[in-house]
Amino acid sequence: MNVAGLRAMGTRFFRYVRDPRVPLWRRLSGLLAVVYFIAPVDALPDFIPILGWLDDVGVLSAAALFMVREVQRYQPEGETSAWPQPVEDGRTGAPPLRER
């Protein structure tokens, strides 16, 4: 992903977080993962050398993957898809193919 794509993803993320149509638990899932990472009480305590850190990394990566997929699927109100939309007679809005 280039810088322009990253910027567009960031803009879309902030639209996603501020959209009242998106359920609250979906908007807060990333924040809750960061709170879990910072909190001293974990499923596996952090003083256990490797396992304690792996559960934190697992929760953060799962939340990041979830948020990226959610933001990619998110369609803000008024934004249209890049795919041609069907018209009334069932054909798509794409021009017809030329016959030989």
Image (spheres, helix red, strand yellow):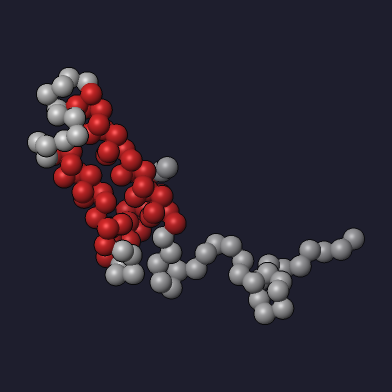
| 66 in relation to 49, above or below | below
| 45 in relation to 95, above or below | above
Question: Furthest-left residue in view?
Answer: 40
Residue 15, quarter of picture: bottom left
Q: x, y (%) of residue 76? A: 40, 67
Q: x, y (%) of residue 96? A: 76, 67
Question: Furthest-bottom residue in view?
Answer: 88
Image mark count: 0
In the foreground, 45 or 71? 45
Residue 87, quarter of picture: bottom right
Q: Can residue 39 be seen in this view?
A: yes
Q: Is residue 78 left or right of residue 63?
A: right
Residue in the picture at 14% in, 28% down: 46
Q: Is residue 41 left or right of residue 94?
A: left
Residue in the picture at 12% in, 24% down: 47
Residue in the picture at 90% in, 60% down: 100
In the foreground, 14 or 58? 58
Residue in the picture at 41% in, 43% down: 2
Q: x, y (%) of residue 22? A: 33, 65
